[in-house]
């Protein structure tokens, strides 16, 4: 954790845990039979472990389409474990987050895109300074469809790392909610966490999927814009959604890469989301001579998805106006 607040034990505890692991104390992970009950349709659930749950919960809580993110423990041998027990490293639990989401807004594979983006999946039993099996990277698919999607998602993610991804695919087990003071921790207390590190390799690694793979991930409207260079009608629902947002980042709806700081938005009067600048390094520009015009198209650096165009008549100091299809964006603070 990059925070001055106390966290899962002091450094000495972490060192002891690391020593125990070095000595080969392997903690068994008992596959419990009781599955976490999914909420009634249409909401679905996903469970992932990606290091300290404070930051992971915070990232998912801010992900569009996610209705709740709960910090908890899963994959251990003791029922109703306490934070103290889990931190001792003897129960086999992982700090994890139970994500409840609307599959009409965000798909399981996109939940996993967020997962890959917010931690380093090549780290074994640690994330940053937090060490121990409780900080392991793991996915807990809640059904066979998620299991298949997770396997494919992991195979795609592996393309971007030179060393093996350490993420474990673990059986669904009972998810125990963490103590109340761990819930909404980052929102309540602030601070920094490993999930907010920049430079995690996969964030800027290319995401290169087939058309069929994209079709499986995106809504038809998103596919038409992002993959077939379509243009949504102006003043659509996506624009009104955007207008209500003042802080955070607009992400690529295809790969979840943060593209635009929402404090850089302005009302251009065009009926499309408009920004004066983009997050550095997140866009590629291509000369577009279609429709008898010469325009500069902007695409997502990571997935090469079509976003919109950039013009030289903007109001900011650099004179740029990024005119973006709202359906190509998702929003996160
Ligand atoms: Zn993208």
Image (cartoon, helix red, strand yellow):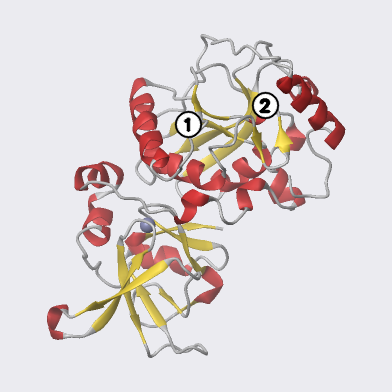
At x 44% / y 23%, what residue is drawn? Answer: 142
Q: Is residue 48 above or below residue 210?
A: above
Q: Position of residue 26 (x, y in %)?
A: 66, 14
- Quarter occupied by residue 60: top right
The quarter of the picture where the N terminus appears is top right
Secondary structure under the numbered disc 2 in the rendered image: helix
Number of labels in the image equals 2
Q: Which residue is mark 2?
A: 134
Q: Residues within 10 Å of mark 2 (few under 14, many from 20)?
A: many
Q: Which residue is mark 1?
A: 46
Residue 259 circle label: none
Q: Is residue 116 visible?
A: yes
Q: Residues within 10 Å of mark 1 (few under 14, many from 20)?
A: many
Spot the residue most to the left. 292
Is label 1's Cβ within 8 Å of ligand 1? no
Secondary structure under the numbered disc 1 in the rendered image: strand
Q: Position of residue 174 (x, y in %)?
A: 57, 17
| 240 relative position to 219: left or right | right
The quarter of the picture where the C terminus appears is bottom right
Q: Position of residue 119 (x, y in %)?
A: 57, 43
Q: Nearer the viewer, residue 299 or 232?
A: 299
At x 59% / y 22%, what residue is drawn? Answer: 175
- Quarter occupied by residue 41: top left
Per the model, the C-alpha gap separating discs 1 and 2 is 18 Å
The image quadrant in which ligand 1 is located:
bottom left
Q: Is residue 235 visible?
A: no
- Quarter occupied by residue 176: top right
| 88 relative position to 154: left or right | right
| 292 relative position to 222: left or right | left
First in sequence: mark 1 or mark 2? 1
- Camera-near label (1 vs 2) is 2
Q: Position of residue 326 (x, y in %)?
A: 35, 65
């Amino acid at each position: 954790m990059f925070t001055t607040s106390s966290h899962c034990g002091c450094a000495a505890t972490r060192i002891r845990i690391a020593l125990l692991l070095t000595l080969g104390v392997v903690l068994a992970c008992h596959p419990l039979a009781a599955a976490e009950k999914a909420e009634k349709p249409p909401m679905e659930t996903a469970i992932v472990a990606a290091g300290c749950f404070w930051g992971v919960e915070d990232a998912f809580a801010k992900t569009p389409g996610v209705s709740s993110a709960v910090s908890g423990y899963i994959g251990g041998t003791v029922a109703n474990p306490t934070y103290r027990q889990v931190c001792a490293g003897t129960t086999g639990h992982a700090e994890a987050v139970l994500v409840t989401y609307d599959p009409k807004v965000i798909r399981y594979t996109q939940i996993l895109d967020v997962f890959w983006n917010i931690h380093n999946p090549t780290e074994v039993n640690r994330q940053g300074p937090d060490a121990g099996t409780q900080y392991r990277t793991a996915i807990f698919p809640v059904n066979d469809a998620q299991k298949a999607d997770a396997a494919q998602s992991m195979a795609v993610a592996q393309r971007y790392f030179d060393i093996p991804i350490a993420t474990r695919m673990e059986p669904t087990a009972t998810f125990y909610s963490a103590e109340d003071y761990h819930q909404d921790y980052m929102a309540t207390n602030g601070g920094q966490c490993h999930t907010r590190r920049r430079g995690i390799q996969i964030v800027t690694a290319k995401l290169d999927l087939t058309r069929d793979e994209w079709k499986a991930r995106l809504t038809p409207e998103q596919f038409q814009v992002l993959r077939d260079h379509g243009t949504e009608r102006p003043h659509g629902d996506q624009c009104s959604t955007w207008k209500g947002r003042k802080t955070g980042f607009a992400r690529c709806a295809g790969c979840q890469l943060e593209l635009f700081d929402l404090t850089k938005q302005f009302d251009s009067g065009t009926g499309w989301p408009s920004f004066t600048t983009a997050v550095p390094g997140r866009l590629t520009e291509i000369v577009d001579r279609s429709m008898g015009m010469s325009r500069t198209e902007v695409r997502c650096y990571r997935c090469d998805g079509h976003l919109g165009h950039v013009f030289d008549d903007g109001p900011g100091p650099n004179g740029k106006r990024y005119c973006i299809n709202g359906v190509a964006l998702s929003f996160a603070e």
